[in-house]
Image: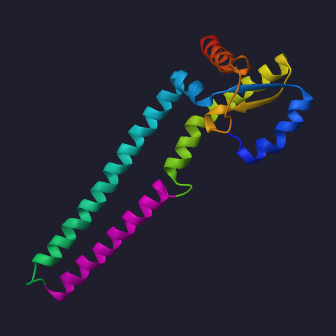
Amino acid sequence: MRCHAGMLLLLLPAALQAGTIAVLDSDRIFDSLGGVADARELLQTEIEAWNRHADSLQADIDAIELDLSRTLMMSPERRRERETLLDQKRAELEQFLSSTFGPGGLAERRNAELVTPIVDEINRIVRILGEENGYDLVLDAAGGSVAYADGSLDITDLVITRMSTRGSAE
């Protein structure tokens, strides 16, 4: 839904010649939707659980390190076992953090899974409004690319109304 400023500058002259422009504020639309708040809350709960798991792994690492530092009388075999376990725990933590919070990780995928259906529905409604009202271009002011727009061009409330009637119709 967000456009780059440079692309807008290239498209704007053609759109002005072609016809009608509308503006919306996707941040306001998202804020008005209960589903987005629910999705964010669910994701936050999952992130907190993942953080607790990471904290647990780190606590295991800390305990093994403390054990290794305090045990002068440990046999060489036992010391190797503990060091091997420490290496395994460190690798496990690193792998967990990477696969959960890294690029393309579980947190990113889960966020997309929760938010994508909502974004798709907003885009569908914007497309319908564009067709019904003859808009040639709909800009999103939330990204900061729109410095000024006459209030009569703002279709945010129309989108919010359609989204809310969609929710009550389901």
Residue 121 vertical position relative to residue 14 in the rendered view, above or below: above
Q: 86 or 115: which is nearer to us?
A: 115
Q: Quadrant of residue 170?
A: top right
Q: Is 127 positioned to the left or the right of 99 in the image?
A: right
Residue sitting farthest toward the right: 18
- Which image quarter holds the N terminus? top right
Q: Is residue 136 one of those drawn in magenta? A: no
Q: Does the magenta run of residues contain 101?
A: yes
Residue at image location 47% in from the left, 61% down from the top: 98
| Side of 66 relative to 89 (left or right) | left
Residue at (26, 67) in percent of width and height: 61
Residue at the far left: name it.
Answer: 73
Expressed as whole percent of the image width and height from the top left, the position of residue 150 reads 71, 21
Q: What colour scheme governs how the chains and residues are painted in the rendered image of this protein? A: rainbow
Q: Nearer the viewer, residue 64 or 138?
A: 138
Q: Which residues make up the magenta segment?
A: 75-102
